[in-house]
């Protein structure tokens, strides 16, 4: 209490003029000190907060400036290094890039499909079975699978146009390498038969062709003696030595592997480059045009393949027709043409910039490089760790995985069908390889590109959301499957082969009085069409005694015909199903490719922006590993399972000479439709999941141009925005 009573006089004294002035100043000083301390603390906190942000921005700016100083000068202008002429800068737009890549994609797609147009010719030349042919086409995917994932992950760290230019050059080299198989075996190919006359015991025709055609009076020795004649054993017209047969497989396989390696960057690089440099709603339009023109490639390949198949393999003049069993088309010309064109058209692509516009956004790996510099950790280990982390995120995405496996089943079907489509038409409708390739070229040249371009235009014009694109895909695939079911009906009956006067059932040898002195070889298949409208196993089995200008005459086994002449090849069947079948394929190809661009939009919008390149590469990797790679092999074994007569030589059993075409049709069509039904079911599962899922399964599909932002940067920006005041409305608009 004394202390309190002592304070009272102090207060009262403070009211006096002199002492009050002193005390009031003291109190003001204390109050001012308190306020100053408070302001200093606030200012210190603000300065500290701003300093943190400033340091962060400075750190980012240092590395961004380092990156931009090194690359912006070269990355945002057309040209190479310091050579950036002004005349080139007008080409720095997506229209010019798309126009150039249309030409590159057309050549690459043509070369990729060309081998499918020459399957029967290659099998005939090198005595391949369909299983080996399927393996050769699958080699295309071996190189692809070896590189596609790693290339897709590092997509934004490379100069995409230049990388695509280099890959296109390798693509051209692969085509030239495949043609080496012809030049190595050129000396073993006989000259084509010209005007010859063979009658009685007088022969003016080369011995190889004579034995190959197997005339009645020529086959005077049993078949088994031909292979026991030592070094002079029987050798067919196109039977290369076993060593060069293996050599041909080697060159073709290496060429196809290199081709697969060169095509691995194409899908991820093209999609990422376009999507990063145009508004998102226009991605489908540009991709639709470029991919649509690329789909002209198979049409060009089969059309030129048909033209080259109508030329004899040695480019010499001959009077035999492509229907003649001795005919061998110039399969190697296409590899030379497309390989050379691939090298030429890829050169201008190297001058395009890495980015169409200058931007201050960092590439995805910049943050990892910052960490590596600060901590001294190996950048490769960080990027590898991040790669597997991103892969786990993709594997945990149910929508993306269903779409990927839908693509797998579709790839098995398309890869297998396109590999043996020409063979199917040849055997099913009894037409030569050149004509079959022309028909395929006409259908694929019109239906597939038209469907792709229209699908891309509709998606861009109406700005279809990913969900709308998914529904559109399901409708198109359903129509495609329903139309494809008609392939069970659109086919021809099994042709009958005659040996003598009786039909051949391939279970026994038909004997006939007209063949008593012929001693025909039952393994030498050389079909001919008699003037009586019947197909015979060989001229010998028709009793033909002579040949004049590729017309077989004096054929004693022809029934009810006075002329007794025949021509090479099977007779035309009384079957009018070819054009309905082609019309069905046109509708199916159109509806299937109509959904191509919407399906791409669904795929790339099912993942986050930072994992988009890896998602594209992973989907392509799985489609090739489980789809395109095994597809031709599976269909090759399926085709071989329908063979009735194998081409047998003294060294091996090779290509099939005669098929059960009805069994061929049922198995070929049944497998294709079954695989596409599974694909359709997966799309329906995705639709059901998206409709009933509580989480939004697709990313934003807007007119904004995408930016390259890493996951760490996204987290960083969120933390920065949480500390600084922002306009909630503008933030919501940005997210939307």
Image: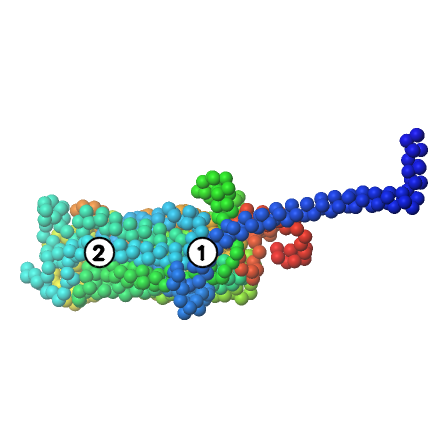
Q: Residue furthest front?
A: 18
Up/down of 646 relative to 334, above or below: above
Image quadrant containing the C terminus: bottom right
Look at 39% across and 61% down and name the residue there: 82
Callout in the foreground (2, 1): 1
Element carrying mark 1: helix
Q: Residue furthest left?
A: 202
Up/down of 4 relative to 731, above or below: above
Q: Are marks 2 and 1 in contact (CB under 8 Å)?
A: no
Image quadrant containing the N terminus: top right
**Which of disc 1 and disc 2 is earlier in sequence?**
1
Res. 645 in view: no
Give whichever of 561, 18 is nearer the camera: 18
Q: Which residue is mark 2?
A: 182
Look at 50% across and 53% down and name the residue there: 65
- Tell me where residue 655 appears, x and y as whole percent: 25, 51
Up/down of 572 relative to 690, above or below: below
- Residue 680 is marked as none
Element carrying mark 2: helix
Q: CA distance from mark 2 to mark 1?
A: 46 Å
- Tell me where residue 275 appears, x and y as whole percent: 49, 58
- Tell me where residue 385 appears, x and y as whole percent: 48, 41
Give whichever of 223, 647 is nearer the camera: 647
- Tell me where residue 451 appears, x and y as whole percent: 45, 64
- Residue 71 is marked as 1
Residue 90 placement: quadrant: bottom left
Answer left or right for 122 relative to 550: right
Give whichever of 247, 151 is nearer the camera: 151
Look at 44% across and 62% down and name the residue there: 77
Answer left or right for 630 relative to 355: left
Give whichever of 364, 127 is nearer the camera: 364
How packed mark 2 is, by other alpha carbons closer than 10 Å (few <14, some 14-19, many 20 or more), is many
């Amino acid at each position: 209490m004394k202390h309190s009573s002592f304070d009272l006089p102090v207060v009262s004294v403070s009211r006096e003029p002199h002492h009050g002035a002193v005390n009031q100043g003291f109190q003001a000083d204390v109050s001012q000190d308190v306020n100053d301390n408070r302001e200093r603390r606030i200012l210190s906190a603000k300065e500290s907060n701003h300093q943190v942000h400033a340091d962060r921005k400075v750190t980012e700016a240092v590395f961004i400036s380092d990156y931009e100083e090194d690359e912006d000068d070269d990355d945002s202008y057309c040209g190479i290094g310091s050579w950036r002429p002004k005349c080139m800068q007008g080409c720095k737009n997506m229209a010019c890039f798309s126009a150039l890549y249309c030409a590159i994609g057309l050549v690459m797609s043509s070369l990729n499909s060309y081998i499918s147009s020459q399957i029967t010719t290659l099998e005939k030349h090198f005595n391949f079975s369909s299983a080996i042919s399927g393996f050769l086409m699958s080699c295309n995917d071996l190189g692809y699978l070896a590189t596609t994932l790693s290339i897709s992950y590092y997509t934004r760290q490379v100069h995409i146009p230049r990388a695509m230019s280099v890959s296109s050059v390798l693509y051209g080299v692969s085509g030239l390498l495949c043609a080496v198989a012809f030049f190595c075996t050129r000396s073993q190919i006989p000259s084509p038969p010209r005007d010859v006359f063979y009658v009685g015991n007088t022969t003016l025709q080369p011995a190889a062709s004579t034995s190959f055609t197997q005339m009645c009076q020529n086959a005077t020795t049993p078949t088994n003696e031909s292979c026991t004649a030592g070094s002079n054993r029987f050798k067919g017209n196109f039977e290369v030595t076993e060593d060069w047969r293996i050599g041909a497989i080697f060159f073709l396989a290496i060429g196809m592997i290199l081709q697969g390696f060169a095509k691995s960057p194409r899908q991820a690089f093209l999609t990422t480059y376009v999507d990063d440099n145009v508004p998102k709603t226009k991605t489908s339009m540009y991709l639709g045009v470029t991919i649509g023109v690329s789909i002209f490639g198979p049409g060009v390949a089969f059309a030129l393949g048909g033209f080259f198949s109508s030329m004899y393999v040695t480019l010499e003049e001959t009077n035999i027709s492509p229907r003649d069993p001795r005919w061998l088309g110039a399969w190697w010309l296409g590899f030379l043409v497309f390989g050379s064109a691939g090298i030429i058209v890829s050169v201008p692509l190297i001058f395009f910039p890495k980015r169409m516009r200058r931007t201050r956004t960092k590439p995805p790996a910049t943050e990892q490089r910052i960490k590596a510099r600060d901590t001294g950790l190996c950048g490769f280990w960080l990027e590898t760790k991040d790669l597997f982390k991103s892969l786990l995120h993709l594997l945990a995405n149910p929508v993306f995985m269903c779409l990927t496996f839908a693509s797998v089943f579709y790839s098995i079907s398309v890869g297998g069908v396109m590999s043996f489509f020409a063979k199917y038409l040849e055997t099913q409708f009894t037409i030569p390889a050149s004509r079959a390739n022309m028909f395929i070229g006409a259908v694929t040249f019109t239906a597939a590109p038209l469907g792709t371009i229209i699908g891309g235009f509709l998606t861009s014009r109406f700005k279809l959301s990913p969900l709308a694109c998914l529904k559109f895909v399901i409708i198109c695939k359903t129509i495609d499957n329903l139309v494809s079911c008609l392939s069970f009906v659109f086919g021809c009956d099994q042709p009958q082969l005659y040996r003598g006067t009786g039909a051949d059932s391939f279970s026994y040898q038909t004997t006939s009085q007209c063949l008593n002195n012929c001693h025909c070889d039952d393994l030498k298949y050389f079909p001919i069409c008699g003037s009586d409208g019947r197909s015979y196993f060989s001229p010998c089995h028709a009793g033909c005694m002579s040949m004049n200008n590729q017309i077989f005459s004096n054929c004693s086994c022809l029934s009810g015909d006075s002329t007794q002449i025949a021509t090479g090849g099977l007779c035309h069947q009384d079957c009018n199903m070819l054009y309905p079948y082609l019309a069905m394929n046109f509708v199916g190809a159109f509806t299937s490719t109509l959904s191509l661009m919407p399906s791409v939009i669904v795929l790339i919008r099912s993942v986050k922006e930072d994992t988009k390149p890896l998602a594209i590469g992973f989907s392509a990797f799985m489609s090739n590993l489980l789809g395109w790679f095994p597809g031709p092999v599976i269909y090759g074994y399926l085709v071989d399972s329908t063979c009735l007569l194998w081409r047998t030589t003294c060294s091996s059993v090779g290509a099939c000479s005669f098929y059960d075409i009805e069994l061929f049709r049922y198995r070929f069509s049944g497998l294709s439709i079954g695989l596409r039904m599974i694909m359709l079911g997966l799309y329906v599962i995705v639709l059901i999941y998206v409709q009933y899922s509580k989480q939004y399964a697709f990313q934003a599909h807007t007119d904004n141009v995408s930016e390259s932002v890493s996951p760490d940067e996204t987290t960083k920006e969120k933390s920065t925005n949480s500390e600084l005041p922002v306009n909630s409305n503008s933030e919501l608009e940005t997210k939307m």
